[in-house]
Amino acid sequence: MNQWLKSLKTDTPQEGFELAIKLSQKGVEYTQPSEEIRKKLRPKYSKNADSLILASQVVAINFQTVAAANNYWRDSYKA
Amino acid sequence: MNQWLKSLKTDTPQEGFELAIKLSQKGVEYTQPSEEIRKKLRPKYSKNADSLILASQVVAINFQTVAAANNYWRDSYKA
Amino acid sequence: MNQWLKSLKTDTPQEGFELAIKLSQKGVEYTQPSEEIRKKLRPKYSKNADSLILASQVVAINFQTVAAANNYWRDSYKA
Amino acid sequence: MNQWLKSLKTDTPQEGFELAIKLSQKGVEYTQPSEEIRKKLRPKYSKNADSLILASQVVAINFQTVAAANNYWRDSYKA
Amino acid sequence: MNQWLKSLKTDTPQEGFELAIKLSQKGVEYTQPSEEIRKKLRPKYSKNADSLILASQVVAINFQTVAAANNYWRDSYKA
Amino acid sequence: MNQWLKSLKTDTPQEGFELAIKLSQKGVEYTQPSEEIRKKLRPKYSKNADSLILASQVVAINFQTVAAANNYWRDSYKA
């Protein structure tokens, strides 16, 4: 796969959260590489509350990693 | 998406918990951006015990992150 | 919401575990604020083994946070 | 509830694992205090593979807490 | 139960991963001590993708503990 | 099983993520060693959104471990 992840560092917590979303999507992509199939699945699971909560859970786990990597953006608080 | 997360710092543990709830909701929003669809799903999953427990689990994971970012509000204990 | 969480500090591990239970319940409450609806759900999920195990999992995650916040009550061991 | 958790300290990793099992069971007990009902549920979920895996997951999460509290029993390795 | 866990220390990351598998199995054993019943369940769940993914998740959680206990085998990297 | 995991160290975050995927697959392999059966399961679960999200969750948990082992690749940021 092409390079898609250069660093876990982000400037802000929100960018960190968005990186966590990207990591979560990539976890799906590696298991199902076909964009066509993934697109077909989207309409269904994106209207299923439990799937959405489960997806939010994966984001939360990846956000833990990104937040730790950025030392919780504590240094930017001082600025 | 507009800026919605400036910092993981909160003044109190309870505000930290409420930030964890916001992070959990945002994890859903990024996957299903339509507010209309999310509102339609709400009446059903909010009356399903397993969905509620699952939602509480996402909050718990995000609260771990927020609590660590705030050093568990240990410094405020001294005040 | 009224103040319900002043601190993550507890005197003993057991009180910490009970705080973890409270946090888990609050995660549900924020998603379903109606006490009436929550009470209706209780008889069913509290007799479903998988729901109970899932609830115990949320408690376990919150207990990780509370235990870390209390430095695992190591200082009280010395007393 | 009577005192059931005095400390997270254990002498050995195996005792720590067994404490993690106890914590997992207590997470269920607080949600369903009736021993009678819990006993009725047991025959079914203890023969369901997914329930057993889920239970093992709760134990794993609690074991993370107990292991950290004991500094992974590193000091006993030196003995 | 007889002694089955002496230490969380392993010589290599792979042995650590295999210890994580053992911990995951033990989490099941403590809940369902009958080897006969566990063997009966095996053919079914070992052919169910979701059960296998769930089992892999338990291993991942236990591997976090074992890896931390071994300081991620960083010292062996120097050798 | 033959040696498949020599180290948790990787040069880049992306290689770390790919190692997390490998760890997740290995967690499945240890439970279901037959490649033939695993291949039969693949077409079905790789087209099931919830299975894919669950798989992404396992990857996220393993990535936490790999990222911590690499100190979040902070040293490479300096280069």
Image: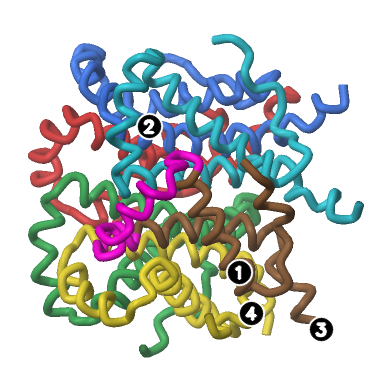
Chain colours: A cyan, B brown, C yellow, D green, E red, F blue
Evaluate whether label 2 is on the same chain as label 3. no
Give the magenta-colored segment's residue range. B30-53
Q: Position of residue D33 (x, y in %)?
A: 24, 81
Helix, strand, or loop for circle 1?
helix
Distance Cα–Cα, label 4 vs label 2: 36 Å
Q: CA distance from mark 4 to mark 3?
A: 12 Å
In this view, which residue lies farthest toward the right? A79
The residues tagged by marks 1 and 4 sit, at their Cα atoms, a distance apart of 15 Å
* Element at label 2: helix
Q: Residue furthest front?
A: B36
Disc 2: which chain?
A: F
Taking the image as shown, residue C1 lies to the left or right of residue E58, namely: right
Q: Which secondary structure class fits the magenta region best?
A: helix
Task: Say yes or no: labels 3 and 1 on the same chain.
Answer: no
User: Label 3 amino acid?
Assistant: Ala
The chain holding disc 1 is: C
Is residue B51 covered in magenta?
yes
- The kind of secondary structure element at disc 3 is loop
Q: Nearer the viewer, residue A38 or D52?
A: A38
Which is more N-terminal, label 4 or label 1?
Answer: 4
Whether residue E26 appears in this view of the structure is: no
Q: Please give the residue where the numbered disc 2 appears in the rendered image.
A: F55
